[in-house]
């Protein structure tokens, strides 16, 4: 598995500079003052480079919602019990969650996958993909989250799921997650990768009060001292303090980038997954689009580290891929403007000068 991981992270092509230049030139000829569409123009140029086409087109959209549990919940880091992870997966399958509503509005499909749910007996019989390697991670305060082999296995499972959907026509992917305790794991990963105090990245998660946030930050700090993840080895960080669903989402990001498909990052947990992907394969970063900025304090830190500017900021902190679903129509709008607006010459409108 290690050999396959190493081969996959070398497969990401650079953005297509020629396609970006042609898209930029066309935007300059459209019936508008130069740059007047702001970031929509930058986004269109980025998408041209990602897709390797100066006139890139939208297509099928897929949001990957990976679920996994975290042993660290035993330390009181969440306002909700662990059983909620399985219950929410059942809600996803029934179509009753926020991500279902927003994905329907965006015209996106959802792939729900179990990457390590503890209460598997509460899961529905069908409607999700079983990628589970174990029933949740270990309590990172007392033991490693998972083995190195399990971390790589989760990454490869996410990679393969994304590769299969792209082979079936997906041309835009969004990252989503569900897992009680996963903001704690994400905080530990981000603090390790960025060498910053846990207090800078730990937030309320599912709704902790100020005392709960301080307790959570202390848990993360103690866990990092106990586990001592090797920040020069991204897999080691994921295995020691991460999450199965987080590793899986890193696999999705790298699979998409390898196939010239844009990746819409959601909130803090998917941001941690994007950071893991970037540490594994720096070439993935130009393929990432930050859908929004979460109310979780660590998300802004992650976006700054990745050099990403969010498209929207609505104070969201739900996860599930909701921000990605909201941003998909904005991404499609940038493509439509590039492709469907008339140039000054086509419209018979006098250009400036």
Image (tube, grey):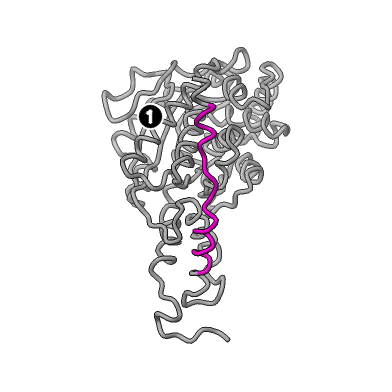
Q: Is residue 141 above or below residue 87?
A: above
Query: On the image, which quarter does residue 55 sit in?
Result: bottom left
For the point 43% across and 21% down, which residue is it?
116
Q: Is residue 18 magenta?
A: yes
The quadrant of the picture occupied by the C terminus is bottom right
Which stretch is magenta? 6-25
Residue nearest the observer in this picture, 74 or 340? 340
Q: Tell me where residue 213 appears, x and y as whole percent.
A: 64, 32
Residue nearest the observer in this picture, 38 or 178? 38
Q: Residue furthest left?
A: 125
For the point 51% across and 84% down, which residue is it?
351
Query: On the image, which quarter does residue 122 sit in?
Result: top left
**Callout 1 secondary element:** strand
For the point 63% across and 16% down, which residue is it?
141
Residue labelled with disc 1: 113
Q: Is residue 187 magenta?
A: no
Query: Would residue 213 appear left or right of 253 to someone viewing this image?
Result: right
Q: Is residue 235 above or below residue 200?
A: above
Q: Residue furthest top?
A: 142
């Amino acid at each position: 598995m290690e050999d396959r991981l190493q081969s996959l992270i070398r497969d990401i092509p650079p953005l297509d500079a020629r396609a970006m230049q042609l898209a930029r030139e066309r935007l300059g000829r459209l019936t508008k003052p130069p740059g007047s569409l702001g970031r929509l123009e930058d986004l269109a140029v980025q998408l041209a480079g990602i897709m390797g086409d100066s006139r890139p087109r939208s297509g099928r959209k897929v949001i990957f919602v990976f679920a996994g549990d975290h042993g660290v919940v035993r330390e009181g880091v969440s306002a909700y019990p662990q059983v909620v992870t399985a219950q929410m997966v059942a809600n996803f399958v029934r179509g009753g969650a926020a991500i279902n509503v927003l994905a329907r509005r965006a015209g996106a499909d959802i792939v729900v996958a179990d990457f390590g749910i503890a209460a598997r007996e509460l899961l529905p019989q069908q409607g999700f993909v079983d990628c589970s390697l174990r029933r949740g991670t270990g309590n990172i305060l007392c033991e490693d989250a998972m083995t190195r082999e399990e971390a790589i296995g989760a990454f490869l499972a996410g990679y393969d799921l994304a590769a299969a959907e792209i082979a079936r026509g997906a041309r835009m992917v969004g990252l989503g997650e569900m897992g009680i305790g996963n903001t704690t794991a994400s905080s530990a990963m981000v603090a390790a990768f960025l060498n910053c105090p846990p207090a800078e990245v730990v937030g309320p998660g599912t709704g902790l009060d100020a005392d709960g946030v301080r307790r959570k930050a202390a848990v993360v700090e103690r866990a990092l001292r106990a586990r001592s993840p090797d920040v020069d080895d991204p897999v080691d960080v994921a295995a020691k303090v991460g999450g199965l669903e987080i590793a899986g989402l890193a696999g999705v990001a790298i699979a998409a980038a390898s196939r010239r498909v844009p990746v819409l990052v959601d909130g803090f947990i998917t941001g941690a997954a994007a950071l893991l992907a970037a540490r594994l394969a720096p070439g993935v970063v130009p393929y990432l689009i930050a859908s929004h900025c979460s109310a979780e304090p660590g998300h802004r830190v992650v976006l700054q580290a990745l050099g990403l500017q969010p498209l929207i900021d609505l104070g969201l902190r739900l996860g599930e891929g909701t921000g990605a679903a909201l941003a998909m129509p904005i991404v499609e709008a940038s493509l439509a403007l590039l492709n469907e607006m008339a140039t000054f010459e086509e419209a018979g409108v006098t250009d400036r000068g």
